[in-house]
Amino acid sequence: MVLTFPLLSEPDVERARELLEGAPWVDGRATAGDQAAQAKRNEQVPGDAPAARELQALVLRALERSPRFLAAALPKRVFPPAFNRYADEANHYGPHVDGAVRFAEGGQRVRTDLSCTVFLCAPESYDGGELVIHDGTASQSVKLPAGHAVLYPGTSVHEVRPVTRGSRLASFFWVESMVRGEERRRLLLELDDALTALRQLHGESAETVSLMGTYHNLLRMWADT
Amino acid sequence: MASNAPAVLSAQPAASNRTPSSPALLPLGAMMLAASFGSLAQTNPGSEGGRTLQQVEVKDKAEAPEGKDSVRATRSTIGKGNQELRDIPQSITVVTEKLIDDRNLDTVKDVLRNTGGISFQAAEGGEEDIRLRGFSLAGTGDIFLDGMRDPAFYDRDTFNNDRVELLRGSASMLFGRGSTGGAVNQVSKVPRLIDENEVATTIGNHAYGRITGDFNRQVGQDAAVRLNVMRTKADNNGAGSSVDKEGVAGAFRWGIGLRNEFLVNAYYLNNNNGINYGLPWIKPRASDTTASNTIIGGLKPTDYFGMASDYNAGLAKMLGINHIHRFDDGSELRTQVRKGIFQRDLRASAIRFAAAGLQPGGAAADLATFGPGTVFTRGTNLKIQDVDTLHGQSDLSTRFNALGYKHEVQTGVDFAREEKTLLASRTAAQGGVDLVKPNTLAGTPNDGATIPEANRVLRDSSNFVAKAYGLYAQDLMQVAPHWKLLGGLRYDNMDGRYNQFAIPANASGPVTTTSFQQKISEWSQRVGVLYQPNDLHSFHASYGTSFNTSGDTYSYNAQSANTPPEKSQNIEVGAKLDTADHRFTTRLAIFHSTKMNERNTDIDTAADRLLLSGKRHSAGFEIDLTGRLTPRWEVYGSYMWMPIAKVDEAAPCPAAPAACAQGTVGNRVGDRPGLSPRHSGTIWSTYQLTGAVRVGAGINFRSAQAPADVTAPAWEAPGFATVDLMAEYRFSEQVTIKGNIINAGDKLYADSLYRGHYVPGAGRLVQVGLITRF
């Protein structure tokens, strides 16, 4: 399931771009394995740069305030957001699957159930740079307005198409969900959505309370906290 | 949904109740989890470094960046294999497709005009005789296509070029026999794993029309085709020659990024252009010496005095196959074979002033008397030749650790068979025709006069066959954390055979054949040291040697056939400096090139070989600027300052200098050789005013320079600067309109020089193009 939603406000996006403008950029291959380095052509801000710290906090705050993100991802842990740039020669990232487990500083492990990309540039300011998510035989090409995010399964093969004009700035990170299976998360989100809509249409009723119980019981059955 | 035609998922604005600003009713998951999930950033600031699990790569799609993306390049294939520019300890200028497109550079000659240190000789064949650092490039076959020699004389078009690379300094280590100045490498467009098409239609003054199409299609998981087409027509190229040409280049690449990758390509270019062979130098006053010779300022750049029946037809056909094998350890074996068939049929008029008696008032033409009534004669110059080439090479790039050091080794073999056949026309006495070209007047350019060129009767004049092979190896060794050492050695072997066919002056036969042969066996070397204190800076010092044989010009005589190669060496100290954001690169170098033993004609007519006694050197400074100063401001600049260019030794001359070839200017001790301007270069800059509007401007300049081999006193063609302008409006991602004004001031200048004449550069060209991408 590929889900898009607005995440960052306009001032947040502006602040992010301002910080990234002055950030120290390094070759993205520095953090990729030997094999991935062959397909990876982008630039990243080192995670310990002051700009990266401030930006991580900014994105995480926005995530905590995003009902859509919380409902869909049911996050347990979020790997600290990173920031990348595609421009000039460092302009694409060939098809790949992300590593299953990421290690944060201090040895904390994050299983990458979900990947998230937050677009930070207006789509008309650059050519190319679509995030293409291959899901079995189908593919989806995503290029969103500045501040919008896309959430997709970490299990998918995905790639970033070459940026042929301008530059593409984005934040990306991984989420370990309380609910491991993508089918189960989808089911829970559908139930959640339908229930929210029902409650808005009809207010609370015995039925909505019962369905809410079903939601929580399913979550109790599947969640791993 | 097919995976190769992904649908675009647009941003779905979330329902209003879900936007962060108005959380009327929260989903259950959100309600439960708000501000409670564990992020690792606050307590354990994340760093991916070092401990990241290796990512699982589905397939290696590592593709080179395309030249159309930027004016800045960071990698090159000029050094054999594929290398970081910062690892090549020599000056390299890369002109990418972006710059080629921005400035509307239709030909490789136009491209080279946009690099520092280049000058052009107006050669007999009117071909691209390029000088770099004052040393000849084209004459010695130092033009390459995808790393393989492209020796034929034809008017190269840029429609299939991704970029053009210029390596300065001794190049024999990489390319075998070659010149002192450097080498030019044209890089072809290759199919990529993407569906992408571009059609550009440009119209301009002089009835200029050019359409190019670049179609790339992914046809499989790891296969793609690319087709480039071109058609260009113009009454006048801005310097008097009509243009009428078409080209098609197709390529199929499969196994892209896999263990075995293949590419087959075919290329076809057909030129039916006109030819402006040039105009004679003129003295200001009859009493002046040749030291005052200059260009005819009263004419327009577009004035053409040749025959309407003159032409410059050229045909180039090439077929190539490439294979890359990738080994498990990252080593790569690249093999390429290319067959080329080229024809050139040039019928030109050398323009000279008619004798004094034919001029108005019976006075020899000079600037004081020059007027519409001044009479020009039109000589006949023909260059009709076929060139047939077969080239193959196999290059291995590998890296390994040995003896405690990291090594990057490039090694390979190459072979070549090059055959050139020259045709001549018979005079009436020899069974052909004598075509008389009528004189013309300065006041009647483009007079439309014709002669029946088709009536000429041709015969074989000479042929040349060269078979050559070479072996080389070079090692770039990391000897300390920031230091790399480069050492390389190459062996070349060439066997050249030349037959000259002569017939009597007044009969169609018999044919007398004179044959010459030469075998060359020669070593070249290159050593260098690189200091790379960090990712941004790379400093180098290098020493290289090269040699060029007298057979490089595809002809021999009794003397040149047994004269050993000329040798040269290049010493260079330079740097490559990136800005912290890697968007802007400055390359600079100080160089010293020496030709150790230049060929000279022996004054002793009894001698059976040329003297190799000449010596000359040039030294100077080069700087290239490429990239973005800000995200909106892109700059390309290339400049060479060559204060020193001097002949150190010459063959001795007899008492009467007029009879001595070494007596011509540029060949005498202390002379500055011709075609060696002190300043030359270009600067080009574009600025993105808004998302849709981009404007650009540039200057090309060359300071005064003398033609080569003139009888003293020498003269210089005036220096010049021309201004180019560009504006682009982007309607959408798909449609862009672009306008160019080339030589906005309509400056008249001498672009290519010869002792007898000069060819003016193009006058003002106004061109508007519509570029569509889909």
Image (spheres, grey):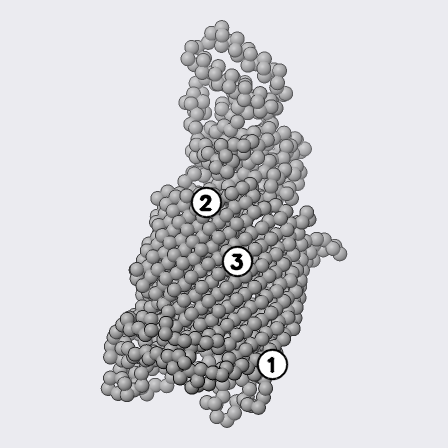
C-alpha separation, residue under disc 2 versus residue under disc 3: 24 Å
Q: Is residue B211 above or below residue B593?
A: above
Q: Residues within 10 Å of mark 3 (few under 14, many from 20)?
A: some
Q: Residue at x 42, y 79 (%)?
A: B426
Q: Is residue B111 above or below residue A224?
A: below
Instruction: Give whichever of A14, A198 is nearer the camera.
Output: A198
Earlier in the chain: of badge 3 and badge 1, it is 3
Which residue of the protein is positioned furthest toward the right in this rendering?
B403
The kind of residue on which mark 1 rests is Asn
Tell me which chain the residue with mark 1 is part of. B
- For label 2, the residue is B196
User: Are callouts 2 and 3 both on one chain?
Assistant: yes
Sequence-wise first label, 1 or 2: 2
Amino acid marked by disc 2: Glu
Mark nearest the camera among 3 and 1 is: 3
| Position in image of residue B87 (x %, y %) | 60, 57
Please tell me which residue is depicted at 46% across the width and 58% down the height of the picture.
B268
Q: Secondary structure at mark 1?
A: helix
Task: State the separation of the CA atoms marked 1 and 2.
Answer: 54 Å
The span from disc 3 to disc 1 (Cα, nearest Å) is 35 Å
Identify residue type, mark 3: Leu
Image-based side of B770 in relation to B619, left or right: left
**Residue placed farthest to the bottom in the image?**
B655
Q: Nearer the viewer, residue A107 or B568?
A: B568
Of tags 2 and 3, which is closer to the observer? 3
Looking at the image, tell me whether mark 2 or mark 3 is earlier in sequence order: 2
Which residue has dot 1 on it? B562
Chain to which the residue tagged by mark 2 belongs: B
Residue bearing mark 3: B319
Q: Nearer the viewer, residue B16 or B79?
A: B79
What residue do we see at 27% from left, 84% from top?
A: B359
Say which chain tag 3 marks: B
